[in-house]
Amino acid sequence: MINSHAHLDFTSMNAIAQNAVAIVPSIGNQNWTEVQMYPYFSFGIHPWMVESHSQQDLDHLEYLIKCNNPIAIGECGLDFHKTIDRDRQMYFFNAQVQLALTYNLPLILHAVKATEEIILTLKKHPQLSGEIHGFSGSNSQAQQLVSLGFYLGFGMQIINQQSSKLRQIVKHCPLEFILIETDDHPNPDDLQQVAAEIALLKQISLDTVITQCDNNAISLFKLT
Ligand SMILES: [Zn+2]
């Protein structure tokens, strides 16, 4: 089973890193080298990290993309829940959108309290592809993203019975646009649990969920 978003290079994740097939996103210049130890990695600057990065880092990011065959650009995006300067976040997000366009790579997006702004940007560039990992927007935003061809990543949040809004979104989101992820949860059973919950919510078999979600990751990230 493919984990579509797992920070395997974080020390807390060492226990599951050995036998996981995963997309390993980077968060900034601090782990651009580490993520390359995994077969499927991406290069980006996370919105939480923009204050410690400069234009020089963006230039270096482009150089790495040219030389090292990442499967995507990210983790990048916007987080308006944090008190990090929004203009600075927008600057780094837009720069990474341009890189995705230039190098024809999918985006791995982090969107918290900023899904609307992300959608506005994606609408301007219909040739973009990618995923919103750890989706936390509304049902209407989920529908808009799916109609733009973007995938939605879901993790352990959907197990929580109190996340009723999110669970409804999973129930109604076409399985062809769902990715399963554990992000930074260090429990190896998480992936299976999330898949089982999707099967339950959609009243379909676990096998169907696993096969389709694996295929979604393979086709979005062109995994070989
Ligand atoms: Zn992440």
Image (spheres, grey):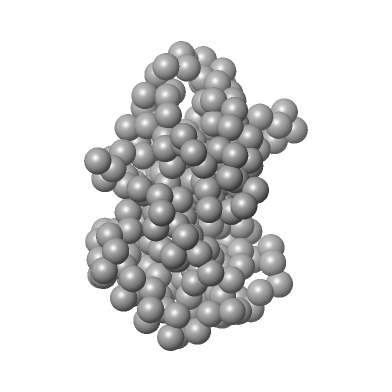
Q: Could you say where residue 134 lies in the image, as x and y percent from the top left? A: 56, 46
Q: Is 81 placed above or below 223 here?
A: below
Picture quadrant of residue 216: top left
Q: Nearer the viewer, residue 112 or 41?
A: 41
Numbered marks: total: 0
Q: At 59% from the left edge and 28% from the top edge, which residue is drawn?
A: 189
Examine the rendered structure and indicate whether residue 191 appears above or below residue 124: above
State the residue at coordinates (40%, 50%): 38
Q: Position of residue 71 (x, y in %)?
A: 32, 54
Locate residue 210: give its quadrant. top left
Res 209 seen here? yes
Report the front residue among 9 and 160: 9
Residue 155 lies in what quarter of the image?
top right
In the rendered view of the protein, which quadrant contains the N terminus?
top left
Answer left or right for 223 relative to 86.
left
Task: Residue 101: give x, y in percent of width and height.
Answer: 28, 66
Viewer-proximal residue, 67 or 92?
67
Which residue is painted at 36% across and 27% down in the image? 212
In the image, is residue 170 above or below residue 48?
Answer: above
x and y percentages locating residue 96 in the rendered image? 40, 70
